[in-house]
Image (tube, rainbow, N blue to C red):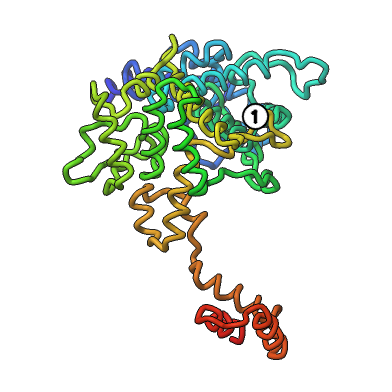
Amino acid sequence: MEKGKRQQKVIRMKTHQGSIRQKTPGGPYYYRVTIRKGLPRKEFPLKTNDPDKAKKLAADLAAVLEAQTQEVALAQINAIKGFSKQAMNLPLSEAWSKYEVHPNRATPHTVSEQLAYQSTYEEFVQFVSNPLPGKRRKHNLITSISEISPEVCEEFSDYLKTTSLAVDTHNRKIKRLRKIFDCLKEYYSIENPFRAKPLLRNEREERDTVVRRQAFTREQEQALMEALRDPKHKLINKDEIRILYTIGMFTGQRLKDCVLMQWQNIDLERRYLSVKQFKTGKEVTFPIAPELYAAFQEALVWKVDAYVCPKTAARYNQTNAAGKDVGNNLVNIDVLRVIRWIGLEPSVDVPGRDKKMTVYGFHSLRHSFASFCAAENVPKATLLSFLGTDSDIADKYYTHVGDASQRQAIAAISDTMQKVSPQEKIDKVLELLKTKPAPTEEVLVQIEKMLI
């Protein structure tokens, strides 16, 4: 027992009714203190195995107890239990390198989103550590993580609102910073300052924006194919882009899934294909439509590798020196050029945003696919088996009560508002007969309808 006491290395404090001890040799020190006579002693971890640091930290706690009332002392000790985090002063300039190696850091699937995390953090640092030109800042300039408060984060959110960002873009920036600060929580003692709900914008703020992604009509899709076959229109890899459009029209898949479609997933003999969606990871299967089968037959002529559209796939997969995807934008520009050929403008200006909102694009083919299925009364579950079960596009074209029921209701209302009297019907028939000297069977059918 005597040996155990020596291993604990008990150090008595003279400044207060407390003691410092180690529970295991070489382990962290603990501070035991009596808050008030008659109450059990409380023990707080000092989170250091350095005896000198332990003495200083215990002295700080003792000073708090001696200077405050008993109630305030208890509250402050609870807060000071995190003082070892406050002591670790992490400059903003070094925080990103700490986050990059944190085991709980975000792991986006794309280099583009990885870079977005860093650029968002740098934007925040630039905001809090530099004066705002022509504007008085509510808070002092900040240089370390421990100085970040909810008020500072709210000021940054207010600043973002002045930059004409879409609601989704604004919220993505806040959520990235929230994740970064989750990983840096050992450097501040308060709750994550980016977890405050007021920092996020409400989607209803854009409810007055009537611009939405539009589906192509059948006539517009036909015009797209005719333009792609017209020799007067010039476009890089034009034949492949035509095949790409055909795939989109008859599968409703996203641009990336169509561009990177591989021959191994196409069974021309059974006329079936499968697509493992890049965005969701789900695999969907399709019977191959006759028009798509003909397109695949054309593509067999240039078959050189795994991809159905090899040159377009190579263009799509281009990256810059940082590893960020840049080819997807190049292919998207090619796709949008075709849409302009038929007289449609892909994007329009929206009040309150710097960036235009897309109206027509390759994704419009996905909307068209859904609208055509709805028009032909294809069950919603069947459509979702093509688009993916988590697709919200189907809700735009399928109603819960059923389109037929809605039409019947509107027809009933219309009939009551525009009901024609029997005499009016007779007068219309007589007018018709004046123009028809010898009524044919077709005219008699028309008269019958008029008298209903």
Residue found at x 40% / y 59%? 380
> Does residue 128 appear left or right of residue 3 in this picture?
right
Q: How many marks?
A: 1
Q: How far across and down, in percent of the image, does residue 1 sit?
A: 27, 26
Q: Which residue is mark 1?
A: 355
Q: Quadrant of residue 48?
A: top left
User: Is residue 20 in view?
Assistant: no
Q: Amino acid at mark 1?
A: Lys
- Is 314 or 64 nearer to us in this picture? 314
The answer to whether residue 341 is above or below residue 14 is below
Q: Quadrant of residue 318?
A: top left
> Does residue 390 appear left or right of residue 272 in this picture?
right
User: Is residue 363 in view?
Assistant: yes
> Does residue 274 appear left or right of residue 115 in this picture?
left
Residue found at x 66% / y 40%? 198
- Is 125 or 321 nearer to us in this picture? 321
Residue found at x 52% / y 48%? 217
Determine the residue located farthest toward the left in the rendered image: 269
- Is 135 or 434 nearer to us in this picture? 434
Q: How far across and down, in percent of the image, does residue 58 sit?
A: 53, 21
The answer to whether residue 39 is above or below residue 403 is above
The answer to whether residue 95 is above or below residue 447 is above
Determine the residue located farthest toward the bottom in the rendered image: 422
- Is 159 or 68 nearer to us in this picture? 159
Q: Secondary structure at mark 1?
A: loop
Q: How far across and down, in percent of the image, does residue 42 sit?
A: 49, 35
Q: How far across and down, in percent of the image, does residue 241 sit?
A: 41, 29
